[in-house]
Image (tube, rainbow, N blue to C red):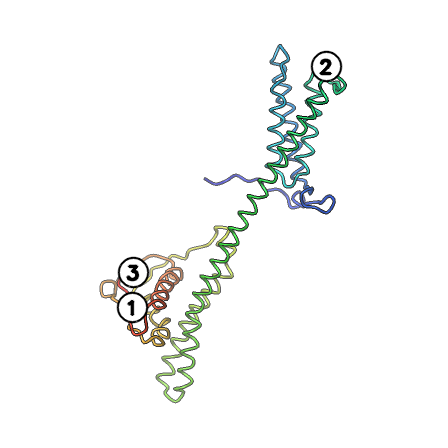
Amino acid sequence: MKRFQIRWPDEWLRRTRLFRTDLLSYSGKDFIVSVSLYLISVGFCLVLRNFDPNNDTSYVSMIFLLDVFLTALLTDGFFFSLTIAVFAVLSVDYIFTPPFWEVSFTLAGFPLTFLVMMTICVATGIVTSRAKKVSEMEREAEREKIHSNLLRAVSHDIRTPMNAIIGFTTLALSNIDDTDRVKDYLGKTLASSNHLLSLINDVLDMSRIESGKIHLEEVEVNLSDVLHDLKTIVSGQIFAKQLELYMDVMDVTDEDVYCDKTRLNQILLNLLSNAIKFTPAGGTVSVQV
């Protein structure tokens, strides 16, 4: 299910810090959210009081505690949760405690009662804001972990075509007088270079991956051609470890699939590179489709 989010104007999201600390910072969005919740709480309590002939206002404290909790949850920092806590206590005394619309702190028992309520409201705001901050830090840590894993995977994918390019270029230079070999090596270098370019483009498009807006270009792809391209890219690694690469493509020579060729190449290349990496020198790597 898609989460509903309000798109606030940038100027309403700009934060102002009090005493140079983020905990007491505020924004226009925080102000609107806090005032709206407070007015809703006051209005709701007034409506309930009109329907209660006994003027029982015992529920008022709970409603304003909920107001403080929601304010701390939906705003950043402690500033508005603490401010609303003060207004909540004053409102309970001035608006909802008999005699209504009068300050009652001078009556016996009220100073202690409202001091306790003020402590509960402030504690609720602080604990909720702190829990929200911890949750944001955990999400940020998880995001950093995903970034690290993604960069590690990308660096692994880039290393394979780079090794192929270096290897084939070296072979071409060492056989410069053999035109046929040089053409063959340059063709393989070009294939590896194109694959490397596609990987670099994916790195540059990382922001689209994070936002879920990555676009798949689905086309008809011949699996035999895909495996042939992969064999060309990893041939340098195969030669370096003296491995035997066996590909069974007899059943798919003329088969086409509908997919994103670049992503398919990345997946199969990653699997094949890992197989080559962990196969002992002189062994065999078998690919069957």
User: Which is nearer the N-term, disc 1 or disc 2?
Assistant: 2
Q: Residues within 10 Å of mark 3 (few under 14, many from 20)?
A: some
The residue shown at (60%, 25%) is 63
- Mark 2 against mark 3, which lies toward the viewer? 2
- Amino acid carrying label 2: it is Pro
Mark 2 vs 3, N-terminal side: 2
Q: Residues within 10 Å of mark 2 (few under 14, many from 20)?
A: few
User: What numbered label is drawn on residue 256?
Assistant: 3
Q: Give the vertical position of 145 relative to 222 (above or below).
A: above
- Residue 247 coordinates in the image, percent (x, y): 27, 68
Mark 1 and mark 3: Cα distance apart in space: 24 Å
Q: Amino acid at mark 3?
A: Asp
Residue 157 falls left or right of residue 284: right
Question: Which image quadrant for residue 80?
Answer: top right
Give the residue displayed 46% in from the left and 62% down from the top.
154
Q: Label 1, on which residue?
A: 285
Instruction: Pick whichever of labels 1 and 3 is earlier in the sequence.
Output: 3
State the SS at label 2.
loop
- For residue 113, what is the image quadrant? top right
Quadrant assignment for the N terminus: top left
At 68% from the left edge and 34% from the top edge, which residue is drawn?
Answer: 82
Image x and y of residue 59, in percent: 60, 20
Q: Which residue is mark 2?
A: 99
The x, y position of residue 104, in whole percent, is 74, 18
Residue 271: x percent and y percent? 35, 62
Q: Is residue 207 above or below residue 17?
A: below
Name the one closer to the observer, 92 or 254: 92
Q: Secondary structure at mark 1?
A: strand
